[in-house]
Amino acid sequence: MDHEDAQWFKSSYSGGSGTECVEAAFTTVDTLVRDSKRPSHGHFHVGAGAWAHFVGSVREGELH
């Protein structure tokens, strides 16, 4: 998948009242992350396992 064709979505943990700041997109091998207010400023990517661990840690309240 070309990163320009990625299907970006706003994180449900980002606020919800117009204050969303994080968007993510999934590829077959990693997760792309960017600032929703500055999408043209680039993104970074993390492996699928690392993303799953991060989201699990947030859900479990280990990260605030």
Image (tube, helix red, strand yellow):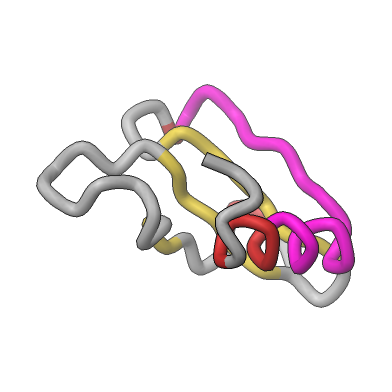
Q: In front: 35, or 11?
A: 11
For the point 72% across and 37% down, the residue is 44
**Farthest residue in the left direction?**
17
The quadrant where residue 37 appears: top left
Q: Give the range drawn in magenta.
A: 40-54
Residue 47 belongs to the span the image colors magenta: yes
Q: Is the magenta stretch mostly helix, strand or loop?
A: helix
For the point 81% across and 62% down, the residue is 30
Relative to 1, say whether 64 is above or below: above
For the point 46% across and 33% down, the residue is 35
Give the total number of marks visible in the rendering.
0
For the point 74% across and 70% down, the residue is 27
Q: x and y percent of residue 34 in the render?
A: 54, 39
**Farthest residue in the bottom direction?**
28
Q: x and y percent of residue 47 in the render?
A: 88, 58
Please give left or right for residue 57 compared with residue 5 in the image. Answer: right
The quadrant where residue 39 appears: top left
Q: x and y percent of residue 25 in the render?
A: 58, 62
Please give left or right for residue 59 compared with residue 10 in the image. Answer: right
Q: x and y percent of residue 64 in the render?
A: 52, 40
Please give left or right for residue 59 compared with residue 36 in the image. Answer: right
